[in-house]
Image (cartoon, rainbow, N blue to C red):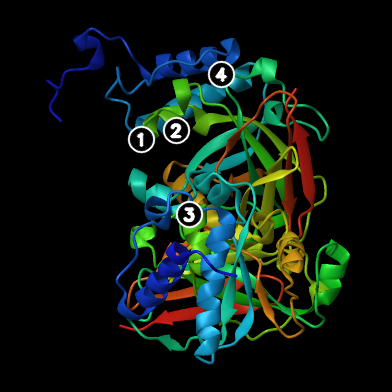
């Protein structure tokens, strides 16, 4: 429940930034005592506002799952954001210029759940057996905070810097993948720009799903069957400009996924 | 260049290619690092540096070492662009560099060792440029192995120019080769991934594409570059194809693991 009017102001400012592309100065500057709980409150206030507009939660993303990102922000655990129905793009579908403010792209697995998961107490084996299938994905991250000047509370309040998701179309059963050593190559306009593997995500992307279920459970939230979970990036994020074509090619039979940023 | 060009010795230095090889060999034996040679010997260009590298290997062979293969260095395209080159560096590996599985990295023999996971080839056919393509290069590969290369520059803080590092045999030091070889025909090396961890914590991940887009491409470019220096890659040779991730320092007592998608897992420890 959001009762702090300053926080409501922050949620309103972030909601406004989606429409106007006028970014918000770091909340951690303007609300010096903003903590993580307050920041999630701001995030949830935006989700509630979106639901009122008729949008639906289709899944969650886990962020800050790499050692490099955690060190950069001085944190030792991930964060999460909400994936709304209007954030999903089809493979190679042109993404209109101006849809995002300062987008970057990250290659990830996407888990599609076949069974619901409710923490706390979810184990890795339960998480694994709840995954119906895995597809390759590109997450488009974006920041409504000026110039990506984010600390932990800023990105948490800003829906974990979520933007969009491009899902691949070659489903693979999780039992047929070694999530930790499955590789990905990321190219921009045909030029290889980064390589990585699932192990970059908290040692295994499965750990991100376990963390998410066990973090949401105490908040009264269940990960629903059919929902999508993005467990975190396998490489550093790559900036995307209008006209860029960014492709992730995955091992393990997952094929490739392309984010096509229109001019 | 006119004959009046001032030689390094005329400037008060007495560097020669032979002396560079002697100095670098002595630094390795004495476990001492030192400054860049190119600071004092501007005449050490890339061609001269490869002649020095050959003299250095001659010294090692005279000391009882046996040449067993080739290592490729600077195989990331982004780093090549920074350094203004378009193919990998080459260096020579000898039997003394090979450590058996389970043997700790001998910190007391090394200066400031770093380690990087690599895809290793054992050649079934001789490969001789020019004109080698990635496809013909891969056809000459007999087996593919997981590997670790320990690098150890004879220059302070790993600070060197391209000719310095070439003369220093591309910082080569020690290596581990996984015992189980895999037929290259069954592998997609551009997507062969490695997860590098230190004491159980993942520090880097990468795929074979980090090496010149594909390790076979690196091998082809190296074979062609070697041909320009009158050399070939022999049947039976071991080829270290280049670091998949950035190298990490080895510290005593640390356990370093490289898990590959299909090539197996290697674990090594700093003594």
Image x and y of residue B222, in percent: 50, 49
Which mark is in front, 3 or 4? 3
Tell me the residue at 73%/30% (across/down).
B254
**What element does badge 4 sit on?**
helix
Density class for disc 1 (Cα within 10 Å; few <14, some 14-19, many ≥20) is some
Mark sitting on residue B46: 1
Outermost residue toward the top in this view: B12
Tell me the residue at 60%/53% (across/down).
A66
In the image, residue B94 above or below residue B230: above
Which chain hosts label 2?
B
Measure how far apart labels 4 and 1 are at the Cα level.
20 Å
Which of the pair A64/B198 is nearer the observer?
A: A64
Image x and y of residue B130, in percent: 46, 55
Are callouts 2 and 3 both on one chain?
A: yes
Image x and y of residue A59, in percent: 65, 78
The tag earlier along the polypeptide, 3 or 4, is 4
Density class for disc 2 (Cα within 10 Å; few <14, some 14-19, many ≥20) is many
Name the quadrant of the C terminus of chain A: bottom left
Which chain hosts label 1?
B
Tell me the residue at 64%/86% (across/down).
A169
**Residue ID for mark 3:** B221
Mark sitting on residue B59: 4
The tag earlier along the polypeptide, 2 or 4, is 4
Which mark is in front, 2 or 4? 2
Image x and y of residue A116, in percent: 80, 79
Are callouts 1 and 3 both on one chain?
A: yes
Q: Name the image quarter holding residue B37.
A: top left
**Residue ID for mark 2:** B166
Judge left or right: residue A211 versus residue A256: right
Q: Are marks 2 and 3 in contact (CB under 8 Å)?
A: no
Q: Is residue A142 visible?
A: no
């Amino acid at each position: 429940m959001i009762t702090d009017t300053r926080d409501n102001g922050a949620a309103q400012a972030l909601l406004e930034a989606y429409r106007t592309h006028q970014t918000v100065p770091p909340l951690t500057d303007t609300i010096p005592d903003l903590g993580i709980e307050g920041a999630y409150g701001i995030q949830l206030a935006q989700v509630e506002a979106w639901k009122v507009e008729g949008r639906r939660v289709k899944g969650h993303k886990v962020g800050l799952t790499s050692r490099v990102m955690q060190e950069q922000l001085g944190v030792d655990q991930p964060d999460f954001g909400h994936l709304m129905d209007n954030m999903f793009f089809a493979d190679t579908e042109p993404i209109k210029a101006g849809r995002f403010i300062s987008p970057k792209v990250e290659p990830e697995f996407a888990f599609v759940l076949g069974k619901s998961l409710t923490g706390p107490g979810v184990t890795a084996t339960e998480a694994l057996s709840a995954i119906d299938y895995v597809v390759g994905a590109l997450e488009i991250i974006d920041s409504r905070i000026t110039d990506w000047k984010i600390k932990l509370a800023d990105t948490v309040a800003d829906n974990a810097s979520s933007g969009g998701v491009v899902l691949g179309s070659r489903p693979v059963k999780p039992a047929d993948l070694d999530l930790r050593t499955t590789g990905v190559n990321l190219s921009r306009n045909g030029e290889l720009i980064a390589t990585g593997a699932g192990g970059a995500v908290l040692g295994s992307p499965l750990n991100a799903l376990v963390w998410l279920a066990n973090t949401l459970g105490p908040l009264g939230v269940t990960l629903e069957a059919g929902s999508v979970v993005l467990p975190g990036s396998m490489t550093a994020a790559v900036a995307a400009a209008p006209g860029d074509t960014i492709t992730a090619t995955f091992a393990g039979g997952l094929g490739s996924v392309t984010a096509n940023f229109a001019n | 260049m006119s004959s009046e060009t001032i030689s390094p010795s005329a400037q008060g230095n007495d560097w020669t290619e032979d002396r560079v090889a002697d100095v670098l060999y002595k630094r390795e034996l004495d476990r001492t690092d030192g400054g860049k040679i190119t600071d004092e010997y501007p005449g050490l260009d890339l061609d001269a540096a490869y002649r020095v590298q050959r003299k250095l290997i001659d010294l090692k062979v005279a000391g009882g070492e046996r040449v067993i293969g080739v290592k490729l260095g600077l195989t990331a395209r982004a780093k090549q662009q920074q350094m203004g080159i378009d193919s990998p560096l080459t260096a020579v590996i000898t039997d003394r560099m090979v450590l058996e599985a389970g043997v700790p990295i001998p910190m007391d023999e090394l200066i400031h060792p770093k380690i990087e996971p690599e895809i290793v080839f054992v050649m079934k056919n001789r490969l001789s440029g020019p004109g080698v393509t990635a496809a013909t290069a891969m056809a000459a590969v007999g087996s593919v192995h997981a590997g670790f290369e320990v690098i150890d520059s004879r220059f302070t803080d790993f600070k060197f120019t391209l000719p310095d590092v070439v003369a220093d045999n591309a910082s080569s030091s020690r290596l581990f080769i996984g015992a189980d070889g895999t037929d290259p025909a069954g592998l997609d090396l551009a997507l062969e991934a490695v997860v590098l961890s230190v004491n159980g914590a993942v520090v880097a991940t990468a795929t074979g594409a980090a090496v010149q887009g594909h390790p076979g491409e690196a091998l082809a470019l190296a074979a062609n570059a070697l041909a320009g220096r009158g050399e070939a890659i022999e049947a039976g040779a071991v080829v270290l194809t280049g670091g998949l991730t950035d190298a990490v320092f080895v510290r005593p007592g640390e356990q370093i693991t490289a898990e590959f998608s299909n090539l197996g897992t290697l674990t090594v420890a700093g003594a």
